[in-house]
Image (spheres, rainbow, N blue to C red):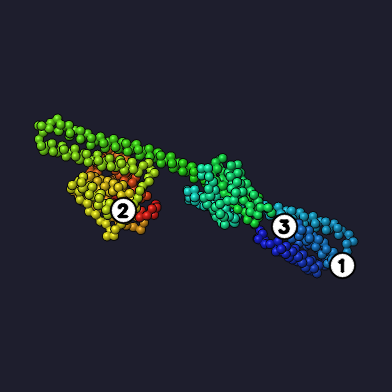
Amino acid sequence: MEPESSLTKRQKFFHHFFIALGLFLIATVTNYFIIAMYHKTINVSGIYLLAVILTSLLTGSYFWGMLSALGGVVGTNFCFTYPYFAIDFSLSGYPLTFFIMALVAIGTCALTVNIRKQRDAAHRREKMANILNEMDQRLLQIDEKKQIVALLLEYLHIQLALPVLYFEIKGEKICCIGHLGDAQEELTNNQYDILCRSLKEQKIIDVGITEDSPSGFLSIPVVRQNRVFGAACILLQKESLSMEMRSYAQGLVNHFAIAFERQELSEAQQQILMEKQAEQMRSYLLRAISHDLRTPLTGILGASGAILNNGETMQPELARRLMLDIHEEAQWLLRMIENVLSVTKIGNYNPELKKTMEPVEEVIADSIARCKKYFSDLKVEVHMPDDVIMLPMDPILIRQVVTNLIDNAYRHGNSQEKVELDVSMCEQYVEISVQDYGKGLPAEKLERLFSGIHDHQQQGGDAGRGLGLGMSICKTIVEAHKGKIFAETVPGKGLRVTFQLPLEEDSFL
């Protein structure tokens, strides 16, 4: 826009007046200088004609161009035509000179106005392109509806300098989910009716300011391919929006409609992905359970059948060993059922945990005590801070995680070595690590340790049943608590599994 656009009408008038007067005086002085040097008046009209052109260009006004043309004709007649310093309208050619200068002024003004309009339009297009480019950059960094709404309100409020609101359809209600500026969330009955009609008809409704209606209202629906996402509402205060600013606001809203559509599609894809992952997890879980149930049940059936068929002739020592096998397999089945119940409690990726503030030391002590019931020779070395650590958790589920990790460390590590359990507290979370002294896992197996995929073909010191199921359950429980879990092979030791739980809800995730 022109620098003088910010001036008042009075200031603009005097600004153009001094331009026209200044150019007239410069032309007059220049003519006197040329006549004094060359003693010829042939170029007088040409100099004034140049002043007319410059005045028309600088003011862009027909009025000042015509006034400058009149001034040039009068100046030529008064200053440079005999009798000097007197106006003689009877001179030949006088009307023709004025007519030519007037035509030049009109033509120059018309060209100037057209050029200025084109320049202003190009400037507005460039400004709009820059704003849209900036918006696109910011929209790429956000993916939540609330953030998109906040950004839309920010741009509308900054560009229009007016209060703006955003309304969304929720069921049968229309709710305000954001506003900026001096705007109330509640609308008047008339404004609410306008909003409803705008959403229903999917078109802009503009109620401008009039003498009867001192407060205007503009409703712009956010529509994309006949899908209505909401409406941006602008409260008009002193005057109605010009057609240019209305089109500008509509362009911004239409651009954001694409962002709302993209966000909705992203949510739908995410939901499909979660359902696919849930289905895949159920498939893995069923396979793992079927495999892990078959193995101990086969052992129990075989041992119990041997005792039943040969109980009278079987040596006591052999019978005792078979009974111990049955007992161990039964204990394994019990732990597996506890894991399955944990998965059932968490549900399909939509956990609603009943968290309470629990002391970490107590949960760990209960887990170790439970593991020692299964493994009488288990040795656990615990390192904890001296201060009591309270965490929001479901204690039964977290106890299940610690139990699974200690169980895994004992069975897949070197059972002759101790299991190390370290607890440390950071600014936003508590970290619990379980370290064994086995052979660890190669990188490719670490990547799918928590995937729920049971590797039935694994061999070596870390081989064992139930590895995939137990660890995937640990991950599910920890993530339901909005925590993190990861594993690493420590050189010279073995596998180290660490999980982190936030000290407060949503504190670091």
342 or 124, which lies in front?
A: 342
Question: Measuring 74% from the left and 57% from the top, which residue is drawn there?
Answer: 61
Q: Earlier in the sequence, mark 2 or mark 3?
A: 3
Question: Measuring 53% from the left and 42% from the top, which residue is drawn there?
Answer: 172
Residue 72: give x, y in percent of width and height. 80, 62
Q: Residue lying farthest top?
A: 309
The amino acid on which the numbered mark 2 sits, given as a three-letter code, is Glu
**Residue where numbered disc 3 is placed:** 60
Q: Quadrant of residue 451?
A: top left
Report if the CB atoms under discs 1 and 3 are less than 8 Å apart: no
The amino acid on which the numbered mark 1 sits, given as a three-letter code, is Ala
Q: Nearer the viewer, mark 2 or mark 3?
A: 2
Q: Secondary structure at mark 2?
A: strand
412 up-or-down from 86: above or below: above
**Residue where numbered disc 1 is placed:** 86
Q: Quadrant of residue 80?
A: bottom right
Q: Secondary structure at mark 1?
A: loop
295 up-or-down from 403: above or below: above
**Residue where numbered disc 2 is placed:** 358
Question: Measuring 83% from the left and 63% from the top, which residue is drawn there?
Answer: 74
Identify the disc placed on residue 258: none
Q: Earlier in the sequence, mark 1 or mark 3?
A: 3
Question: Measuring 32% from the left and 36% from the top, which residue is drawn there?
Answer: 286
The amino acid on which the numbered mark 3 sits, given as a three-letter code, is Gly
Residue 93: give x, y in percent of width and height. 87, 58
301 or 118, which lies in front?
A: 301
- How far is disc 1 from disc 3 in space, using C-alphas? 31 Å
- How far is disc 2 from disc 1 in space, using C-alphas? 107 Å
Q: Residue lying farthest front?
A: 189
